Protein backbone atom coordinates (compact mmCIF):
# COMPACT_ATOMS: atom_id res chain seq x y z
CA UNK A 1 0.00 0.00 0.00
CA UNK A 2 1.23 3.51 -0.88
CA UNK A 3 0.17 6.77 0.75
CA UNK A 4 0.45 10.21 -0.82
CA UNK A 5 -0.29 13.54 0.86
CA UNK A 6 -1.15 16.77 -0.94
CA UNK A 7 -3.07 20.00 -0.50
CA UNK A 8 -5.72 21.23 -2.87
CA UNK A 9 -7.38 24.62 -3.20
CA UNK A 10 -9.68 24.75 -6.23
CA UNK A 11 -12.64 27.11 -6.55
CA UNK A 12 -16.13 25.80 -7.27
CA UNK A 13 -16.11 27.37 -10.73
CA UNK A 14 -12.70 25.94 -11.60
CA UNK A 15 -13.75 22.43 -10.57
CA UNK A 16 -17.08 22.40 -12.46
CA UNK A 17 -15.64 20.90 -15.70
CA UNK A 18 -14.18 18.07 -13.61
CA UNK A 19 -17.46 17.57 -11.72
CA UNK A 20 -19.48 17.54 -14.94
CA UNK A 21 -17.23 14.91 -16.51
CA UNK A 22 -15.75 17.23 -19.16
CA UNK A 23 -12.30 16.65 -17.66
CA UNK A 24 -11.47 13.17 -16.35
CA UNK A 25 -8.30 13.60 -14.32
CA UNK A 26 -7.01 15.91 -11.61
CA UNK A 27 -3.22 16.20 -11.50
CA UNK A 28 -1.72 16.97 -8.11
CA UNK A 29 1.80 17.24 -6.74
CA UNK A 30 2.33 15.48 -3.43
CA UNK A 31 4.46 16.70 -0.53
CA UNK A 32 7.64 15.16 -1.94
CA UNK A 33 7.14 16.49 -5.48
CA UNK A 34 5.59 13.48 -7.26
CA UNK A 35 2.96 14.25 -9.90
CA UNK A 36 -0.10 12.07 -9.49
CA UNK A 37 -3.11 11.78 -11.81
CA UNK A 38 -6.32 11.02 -9.92
CA UNK A 39 -9.72 10.39 -11.54
CA UNK A 40 -11.83 13.51 -10.92
CA UNK A 41 -14.81 11.44 -9.78
CA UNK A 42 -13.02 10.74 -6.49
CA UNK A 43 -13.09 14.45 -5.59
CA UNK A 44 -16.83 15.02 -6.16
CA UNK A 45 -17.73 14.15 -2.57
CA UNK A 46 -15.49 16.97 -1.32
CA UNK A 47 -16.96 19.75 -3.49
CA UNK A 48 -18.67 22.57 -1.58
CA UNK A 49 -19.79 26.07 -2.60
CA UNK A 50 -16.27 27.21 -1.79
CA UNK A 51 -14.72 24.55 -4.02
CA UNK A 52 -12.36 21.85 -2.83
CA UNK A 53 -10.08 22.91 -0.01
CA UNK A 54 -7.86 20.95 2.32
CA UNK A 55 -5.12 18.43 2.78
CA UNK A 56 -5.73 14.98 1.36
CA UNK A 57 -4.40 11.47 1.72
CA UNK A 58 -4.49 9.19 -1.32
CA UNK A 59 -4.04 5.48 -0.67
CA UNK A 60 -3.25 3.12 -3.53
CA UNK A 61 -2.24 -0.47 -3.90
CA UNK A 62 1.45 -1.13 -4.59
CA UNK A 63 0.64 -1.33 -8.32
CA UNK A 64 -0.96 2.14 -8.20
CA UNK A 65 -4.62 1.09 -8.22
CA UNK A 66 -6.88 3.43 -6.27
CA UNK A 67 -8.02 2.38 -2.80
CA UNK A 68 -9.31 5.56 -1.15
CA UNK A 69 -9.05 9.34 -0.97
CA UNK A 70 -9.54 11.08 2.38
CA UNK A 71 -9.58 14.72 3.39
CA UNK A 72 -7.51 14.88 6.54
CA UNK A 73 -8.16 18.59 7.27
Image (tube, rainbow, N blue to C red):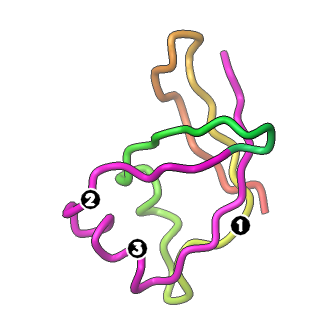
In the rendered image, the quadrant that contains the C terminus is bottom right
Q: Closer to the N terminus: mark 2 or mark 1?
A: 2
Q: Is residue 55 left or right of residue 58?
A: right
Q: Position of residue 20 (x, y in %)?
A: 23, 69
Residue 15, numbered circle? 3
Q: Is residue 12 above or below residue 66?
A: below
**Disc 1 target residue:** 54
Q: Which mark is residue 35?
A: none
Whole-percent x, y for residue 62 in the image: 59, 11
Question: Where is mark 2, residue-wise?
Answer: 23
Picture quarter containing residue 35? top right
Q: Residues within 10 Å of mark 2 (few under 14, many from 20)?
A: some
Residue 1 x %, y %: 66, 15
* Residue lying at 71% horizontally and 59% vertically, measured from the top left: 7
> Which span is picked out in magenta?
1-29
- Across and down, in percent, residue 37 comes to 46, 40
Q: Is residue 10 above or below residue 37?
A: below
Gap in angstroms between the C-alphas marked 2 and 3:
9 Å
| Residue at the spot 48% in from the left edge and 28% down from the top edge | 66
Amino acid sequence: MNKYYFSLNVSYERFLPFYQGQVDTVQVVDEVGRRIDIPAKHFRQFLTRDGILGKFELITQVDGKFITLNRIY
